[in-house]
Amino acid sequence: MSTSAPASASPDATATDDGRLGLLIADDHDIVREGLRRVIDLHPDMVVLGEAASGEEVLAFARRRRPDVVVMDARMPGMGGLQATRALVQRHPPVRVIVFTAHSEQELLWEALDAGADGFVLKNSDGDTLVGAIRRVVAGDPFVDPRLAPDMLRQLAQPPRTKALSPRERQILQLLADGASNRDVSEELGLSLETVKTNVKHILAKLDAEHRTHAVAIGLRHSLIS
């Protein structure tokens, strides 16, 4: 299904003019989009601006009209939800993304956070959970489905089980915590991109981290970085 942004929407158009939160629903199943629309329509402070069935459609919609929140399926044909999330937060930082998925693997959660998602909600959640997540991320607070939070916290609480990071690795991890990409780190430290990628792999291995976001969280919790 193609997106439903008004033809007159300009590239600089805001989500709504009446104070309501504007949402984009992205899922490749019609029945899921219909169900989400019904849930959101129950809340007068929210409005569905459009729908998308692929990551490409999400980005095309965002170019025409800025939603406040995208409820994004993790896995869609073509450009998947995580790839679209990464591109969306780079191009349109104010947009909040909630990954909405049937898959409860911790690895997928870390991948979503690493891509820049603000929330992670399982599809078998009730409507109140999703609406609460929308309001949380708009307020600037991250949201993780309560059923996944305990395992996530246990992972963060575990101390690094291998040898300590080198000074260079700590420096790189600090830059990652500050929001730098691999290319940013390369330019900041005068290292080749391949060298940076290799160092990041070593950092993940040493901290037993799933992804960069996980490594940063571990580094902060255990005072490896500030």
Image (cartoon, helix red, strand yellow):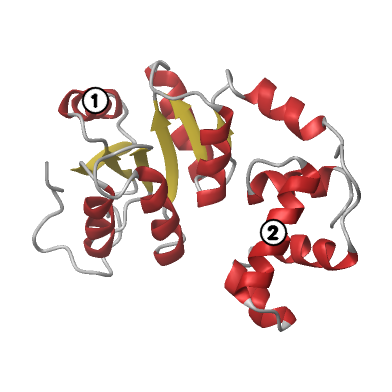
Q: Is residue 9 left or right of residue 177?
A: left
Residue displayed at 58% across by 29% down: 106
Residue found at the far left of this picture? 7
Q: Is residue 61 visible?
A: yes
Q: Is residue 136 left or right of residue 13?
A: right
Quarter of the image with the C terminus is: bottom right
Q: Quadrant of residue 12?
A: bottom left
Q: Quadrant of residue 124?
A: top left
Which is more toward the observer, 51 or 111? 111
Measuring from the top left, give residue 194's x and y in whole percent: 62, 71
| Secondary element at image label 1 | helix
| Secondary element at image label 2 | helix
Measuring from the top left, give residue 50's x and y in whole percent: 20, 44
Residue displayed at 88% across by 53% down: 224
Residue displayed at 57% across by 30% down: 144
Which is more toward the observer, 218 or 7? 218
Measuring from the top left, give residue 88's x and y in whole percent: 39, 57
Q: Is residue 90 left or right of residue 44?
A: right
Residue displayed at 90% across by 47% down: 163
* Label 2 crowd bin: few (<14), some (14–19), many (20+), radius 10 Å: many
Marks 1 and 2: in contact by CB < 8 Å? no
As measured in the structure, the alpha-carbon distance from the residue carrying label 2 to the one carrying label 1 is: 37 Å
Q: Earlier in the sequence, mark 2 or mark 1?
A: 1
| Residue type at numbered disc 2 | Val
Q: Is residue 178 visible?
A: no
Q: How many marks?
A: 2
Which is more toward the observer, 126 or 42? 126
Q: Which residue is mark 1?
A: 32
Q: Disc 2 or disc 1, which is closer to the eye?
A: 2
Q: Which residue is mark 2?
A: 200
Measuring from the top left, give residue 128's x and y in whole percent: 43, 20
Quarter of the image with the N terminus is: top left
